[in-house]
Image (tube, rainbow, N blue to C red):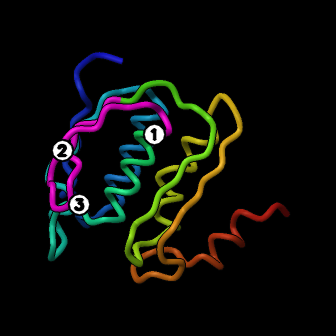
Amino acid sequence: MAGQPVEVDGGIMEGGGQILRVSTALSCLLGLPLRVQNIRAGRSTPGLRPQHLSGLKMIQDLCDGQLEGAEIGSTEIMFTPEKIKGGIHTADTKTAGSVCLLMQVSMPCVLFAASPSELRLKGGTNAEMAPQIDYTVMMLKQP
């Protein structure tokens, strides 16, 4: 999918990872190229952390996208999505990074996949500054 990328300043508002997760998921859903700059500029350690990189790579896999600049510490990425596909998608933060935050970036996309999807997520379940797994499970349960 070609065209000019949507430009997002990752340092606006609280300057954390949420704008990266939301903008990447929307890019995937809408099929629009995306450039995010100033990633996590509002944090004491700016740039991508392992959990952010894991989420980006999972989204790249979900839609056979192209991802540039995705390294630990990077403050800018370029993402070009293709069509969302089903299947088994895995992300491992290799830290206590939150699986619930991995779900935030991936679930909107798998809901629109052309075939069934399975997410295999490894990381922390009750991390600081992230939704807790018990709350997330409760919210996803059918009434």
Amino acid type assigned to the residue bearing label 1 in the image: Asp
| SS of the residue under disc 3 | loop
Q: Is residue 78 magenta?
A: yes
40 is higher (above) or lower (below) than 55: below
What's the distance in space between the residues labelled 3 and 2, CA to CA? Answer: 10 Å
Q: Which residue is mark 3?
A: 48
- For residue 94, what is the image quadrant? bottom left
Q: Magenta span covers which residues?
A: 62-80
> Which numbered disc covers residue 69?
2
Q: Which residue is mark 1?
A: 61
Q: At 32% from the left edge and 52% from the top edge, which residue is drawn?
A: 20
Amino acid type assigned to the residue bearing label 2 in the image: Gly
Amino acid type assigned to the residue bearing label 3 in the image: Leu
Residue furthest top as drawn: 2
Q: At 15% from the left edge and 73% from the top edge, which residue is drawn?
A: 45
What's the distance in space between the residues labelled 2 and 1, CA to CA? Answer: 16 Å
**Relative side of 108 to 128, left or right:** right
69 is higher (above) or lower (below) than 143: above
